Image: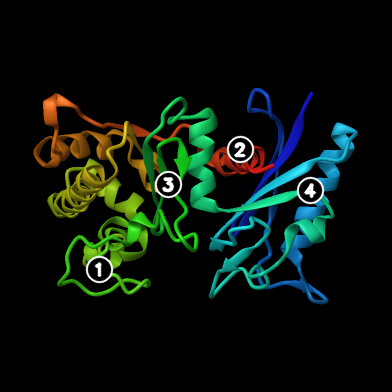
Amino acid sequence: MSLAIGIDLGGTNIKAALVETASARTLATLSKPTRDGEFDGNTPRFALTVREIVHEFEAQAGQKLRVGLSAPGLANPDGHCIDWMPGRMHGLEKFHWSAFLERDCRVLNDAHAALLGEVWAGAAKDTQDAFMLTLGTGVGGAIWSGGRLLKGRIGRAGHLGHITIDANAPCDDFNTPGSLEDAIGNQTIGQRGEGRYANTHALLDAFSAGDEHAAKVWHTSVRHLAAAIASLINVLDPEVVIVGGGIAVGAGARLFDPLQQALTGFEWRPGGHQARIIPAQLGDSAGCLGSVFNLLQNS
């Protein structure tokens, strides 16, 4: 049996999976706190935790295993480290995982890994062209085109949350005016909701209870999302558009029903062709599986 370890290194938790590579079947999982900002000497605590996880899975498997790892930031083209991750995950930039773990370890951006997981074993399986949006605190994204992951020159490709919806609106954290991230990401709900809702889930609860103000705020956000998706469909011509993340999971039909309705007015559908808009399938396991798939593709 061919096995590998997939690790999704997040800001709060490190999720890991022992994966049978021939079938993409998860045999075991682990989750441990990241403890960002803690160091043992010069080594980030999260690196030591990753090594502990690897050793636990190897003891279970009875063999030395290869590792695929996803993390925030821009991955180096050689796949051994994250080149750029400012502001948090201290010690992650330029940390050489293959050298530290003393084995083959391929590193990938976390949004890229989530899409690869869906391509390998989820919503985008057997597709050649797809893109993914993850709606949460911000808006993440990744692109699968012609059967390959688009990374771009420096690994920046797929930052779909940082496209402009309104050029006259204030700039987001990436200096993008009126971005999709600001239009629907949870971090701007205070401004969009005029301080009435603690988070997007509270907005949705109010919307479900018949609050007219909440309905206006939510439908405006979804309309912006639909306009962005229609624009990206024109650029990328996907078979499927995958929408995931905490907001999408929590909203369910309250997101997908009005989104489909808005896309009916926005999407260019030559010959009646219509891109399928579908929810992500793999949840928290997407990054782990995608990290293993990336390892298999680049070994």
- The quarter holding residue 6 reads top right
Name which residue type carries label 1. Answer: Gln
Residue 243 on image: x %, y %: 36, 40
The quarter of the picture where residue 43 lies is: bottom right
If you read the primary sequence from the N terminus, does the residue marked by circle 3 or circle 1 appear first? Answer: 1
Seen at 77% across and 28% down, the residue is 2
Marks 4 and 2 sit apart, C-alpha to C-alpha, by 19 Å
Question: Which residue is depicted at the point 44% across and 57% down?
Answer: 152
User: Which of label 2 and label 1 is nearer to you?
Assistant: 2
Q: Which residue is mark 2?
A: 293
Q: Position of residue 87 (x, y in %)?
A: 54, 75
Measure the alpha-carbon separation of dots 4 and 3.
26 Å
2 or 1: tag closer to the N-terminus: 1
Residue carrying label 3 = 246
CA separation, marks 4 and 1? 41 Å
Disc 3 and disc 2: Cα gap in Å?
23 Å
C-alpha separation, residue under disc 2 versus residue under disc 1: 39 Å
Q: Is residue 136 left or right of residue 276?
A: right
Whole-Å distance between the Cαs marked 3 and 1?
20 Å
Which numbered disc, 3 or 2, marks the residue that appears first in the sequence? 3
- Circle 4 is placed at which residue position? 53
Q: Residues within 10 Å of mark 1 (few under 14, many from 20)?
A: few
Residue 23 vs residue 282, the one in the foreground: 23
Mark sitting on residue 191: 1
User: Does the rendering let one see residue 282?
Assistant: no
Q: Which one is nearer the viewer's eye here, 108 or 235? A: 235
Q: In this orientation, which residue lies closer to the viewer: 91 or 13? A: 91
Give the mark nearer the N terminus: 4 vs 1: 4
Q: Mark 4 touching mark 3, by CB under 8 A? A: no
